[in-house]
Image (cartoon, rainbow, N blue to C red):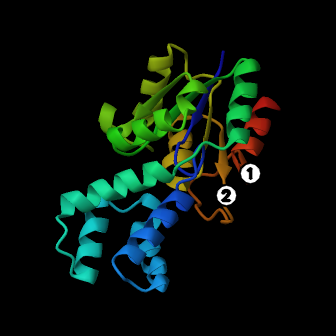
Amino acid sequence: MPLLLLDLDNTLLDRAGPFRAWGERFLAGIGAPAADIDWLLSIDADGLTDRWDVADAIRDRYALRIPSIDLVEELHDGVVANTRLDPLVACALRIADDAGWVPVVVTNGTARQQDAKIRGTGLDRYVADWVISEEVGVSKPNPRIFALAAQRARLPLRGAWVVGDSPEADIGGAAAVGLPSVWLHRGRSWSDTRFAPTRTVDGLIAAVAVVLGG
């Protein structure tokens, strides 16, 4: 039974939409101009900026007296509260499982937030297990996190595929461990010359179809 190693944010679960939804409500709540959402999205950098740095940037820009720790909590909870599992993604995972693949989530991020998203959306019912970087002490693209995912599933890495939207973390990680990969382009063009995905698609459902098609 081969492994299907899946990224979480903007692969299995939309993160960009929930973050924008939280950001728009937050900015409205503090009386900031609606156009400032573009600034907030740029600071967030698609989730790559540390949450504490995002919180500090917000506090500085708007001279807020909210403690950074409270703003970080609001960032975490706001994104989680707005996150939903697409029924079509759930269906694709069920199809992969029925075809003999073992879906395992491999994600960077904090254990508290990522675990809450996996359980809170019901995604946990459609995957065999999950590995979160903070929990295991190693992050993608380090090959070790993929090996830990295989150990947790009690399956070999040989024959696995990696699916994700991050060129560096997901596709670079797959290349480092010698596995084929599917990149979710999200409207972007591939530009890295060090490695390349095996296949490029526009979403998780198409990625599962690629893997099942061999």
Dot 2 corresponds to which residue? 185
- Element assignment for label 1: strand
Q: Earlier in the sequence, mark 2 or mark 1?
A: 2
Mark 1 crowdedness (10 Å alpha carbons): few <14, some 14-19, many ≥20: some
| Quadrant of image for the C terminus | top right
Within the image, what quadrant is residue 26 found in?
bottom left
Up/down of 112 relative to 32, above or below: above
Q: Residue at x 42, y 41 (%)?
A: 114
Which of 99/3 is in front? 99
Dot 1 corresponds to which residue? 201
Q: Is residue 214 visible?
A: no
- Element assignment for label 2: loop
Q: Are marks 2 and 1 in contact (CB under 8 Å)?
A: yes
Q: Residue lying at the far right in this picture: please name it.
A: 213
Within the image, what quadrant is residue 110 found in?
top left
User: What's the residue type where badge 1 is placed?
Assistant: Val
Within the image, what quadrant is residue 187 found in?
bottom right
